[in-house]
Amino acid sequence: MTFPVVGMVGGGQLARMTHEAGIPLGIRFKLLSDTPQDSAAQVVSDVVIGDYRDLETLRAFAQGCDVVTFDHEHVPAEHLRALEADGVVIRPGIEALLHAQDKGVMRERLREAGVPCPRHRIVADPEDVARFAEEGDGFPVVLKTVRGGYDGKGVWVVRSAEDAADPFRAGVPVLAEELVDFARELAANVVRSPHGQAVAYPVVESIQVNGVCDTVIAPAPGLSEALSAQAQELALKIAAELGVVGHLAVELFETKDGRILVNELAMRPHNSGHWTQDGAVTSQFANHVRAVLDLPLGAPNTRAKWTVMTNVLGGDYPDMYAAYLHCMARDPALKIHMYGKGVKPGRKVGHVNTYGDDLADVRERGRHAADYLRGTITE
Amino acid sequence: MTFPVVGMVGGGQLARMTHEAGIPLGIRFKLLSDTPQDSAAQVVSDVVIGDYRDLETLRAFAQGCDVVTFDHEHVPAEHLRALEADGVVIRPGIEALLHAQDKGVMRERLREAGVPCPRHRIVADPEDVARFAEEGDGFPVVLKTVRGGYDGKGVWVVRSAEDAADPFRAGVPVLAEELVDFARELAANVVRSPHGQAVAYPVVESIQVNGVCDTVIAPAPGLSEALSAQAQELALKIAAELGVVGHLAVELFETKDGRILVNELAMRPHNSGHWTQDGAVTSQFANHVRAVLDLPLGAPNTRAKWTVMTNVLGGDYPDMYAAYLHCMARDPALKIHMYGKGVKPGRKVGHVNTYGDDLADVRERGRHAADYLRGTITE
């Protein structure tokens, strides 16, 4: 057998769905997971249980992998460098990963590359936050710890210096950014291979609720062709500038005066690309696998006029399986993607994809299923 | 967790693709496989290595499964009865499986149900074959061992009594059938759930080469609405009559005078339904899982005007992975499905799906990829 082994560090749902997408390609998938109960560990044959923060664990895992890629950004930078020195093929690539691990470094790198970003700088303490506010339009100001944040964690919107103490408690550098008065949030998803081939998915609208992605609409309704092309070009430029290999999600603000600004980056399959599983010729997961193996990339074209992804969050109702009866009977075209995770209030435990010609109907079907699975509605 | 465990006996590609389809539903998949190298065993987490011909192995495997289903028809009938007596939930269901295991019993059952079949009867020896021929239009006659045949194995076309010795050597009863002068072969795929819900996929054309499925075209080109509806109704009737739960493939002859006759049945996902992975809203594998769990079935509608499945057989060229570069670069919309099996000449090792609006183009893309992967062509 000449089929390669793709090693993935991290047992979350992104690894789970990447494995699913790799099965048809016949590639071997090897997983480093914290526990056998992790989302991906439940469905992968070749699983190593271990701690990604331990270098020797990583080294042993990387043995026999043709390439190593990642479910998350939390592997310590020094470990990544040590693996690279060992000759392990790491993708998206060390430099790209290091940028993804530190929001301050990332902002600086993007600024140098001429990428439009919100006004920002590293701030030292609450007084410095007040100075940052005065340098612009005043409060409110967004504060982010440069490492460790996701899904609204590690992000604060503060309205005064007195309000700004919390972000500094973690002992991690804090990045201040202007609070952008955006019209809506967009995401540009692209995939890039080692020799530089790249594909761009249609730009999507991403609707957040309480800092967590709730709904993604593909393509973004009413987005001008010019702004759509600009967003795709920007994402392709960032992927090339940072040397990203694999999937890159660029989260964007569309301002009320018709500009786009880069909010966050993710160098792995991303929530804003989950719609591609049912709405595109090639899913983000399949293209991530193809990219890290330096295979030609798959077509990113849409398969429906509208595809909507609606996240399923845990609620008070633990038995999501029982809810399948109603959801599947109501909507035989509903595409359910559950992660095998225990239900906790607010935790992302799955998503549903819906598609069709009528956007209002496609959104309603997704909303209904997500709410019913969560237990927010009972009919 | 209230998500059920689906146990599957047999580690072939059907189990592999069923697992793939079950991942998004969050169900637990447990596999009984002959070896850890089997197609499905490579990609499933929860694998028991054991022999399905051993009752105690089956009993131990069935412990903790909410339902047991099958990758093949070879589990001994007495073992199925013993498991059922233990209270194991077996699907498609004992009676249906017993019919599928014996082509003689199946033919008799179909005849009783009024299903149009080729002229047939069990024959005792070569002289009896001659009598069977004389009862109809003479030789050639088709002979089949009632058990153990697949992909052209266990099937003979004989032109004289002298020619008819081989089929009797296995010591298995032999079924004689008229050689139908068919215009083409069709297949009607349906899925049925325990409480009787059923869905019918569009009727497809199936093109065999040397007794092995080569190409499937969905929907069957130029098939009249009347004959299409008749084929679907026939498959739904057979599923209900035999009490099938899960996927049922009904292979049909379309005669030159515009009738359909039942050729073979398979009570599991089937080669003639592989196109549904990329060409239907719900794949045959996802619907098989939903059916055996008595969940509402998914929509069987097509997602493209034409979808073509082309089988990839092993050739002299062992390195199919190297062929990915050419195939993926030539056709970014190509959908590859490899089974993780070693290449042997003539062995089914994968298939490719292509879809689009222009049937000739869709067929050419599939043909090219399958031939290139096999090594029959090099450009």
Image (cartoon, coloured by chain):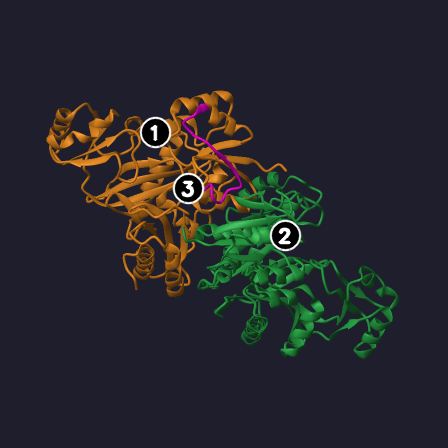
Chain colours: A green, B orange
What amino acid is labelled 3 in the image?
Leu
| The C terminus of chain B - image quarter | bottom left
Q: Which residues are magenta?
A: B40-55
Q: Which residue is mark 2?
A: A56
Instruction: Say what amino acid the circle numbered 2 marks.
Output: Glu
Kindly indicate whether the residue at mark 1 contacts the one at mark 3 (C-beta within 8 angstroms).
Answer: no
Mark 1 lies on a secondary structure that is: helix
Mark 3 belongs to chain: B
Q: Does residue A377 lie above or below B174 as drawn?
A: below
Q: Residue at x 75, y 70 (%)?
A: A179
Q: Position of residue B31 (x, y in %)?
A: 49, 36
Q: Which mark is residue A371?
A: none
Q: Counting other residues with Cα less than 10 Å from the Cα at mark 1, is it few (<14), some (14-19), or many (20 or more)?
A: many
Q: Nearer the viewer, mark 1 or mark 2?
A: 2
Q: In this orientation, does residue A365 appear?
A: no
Q: CA distance from mark 2 to mark 3?
A: 38 Å
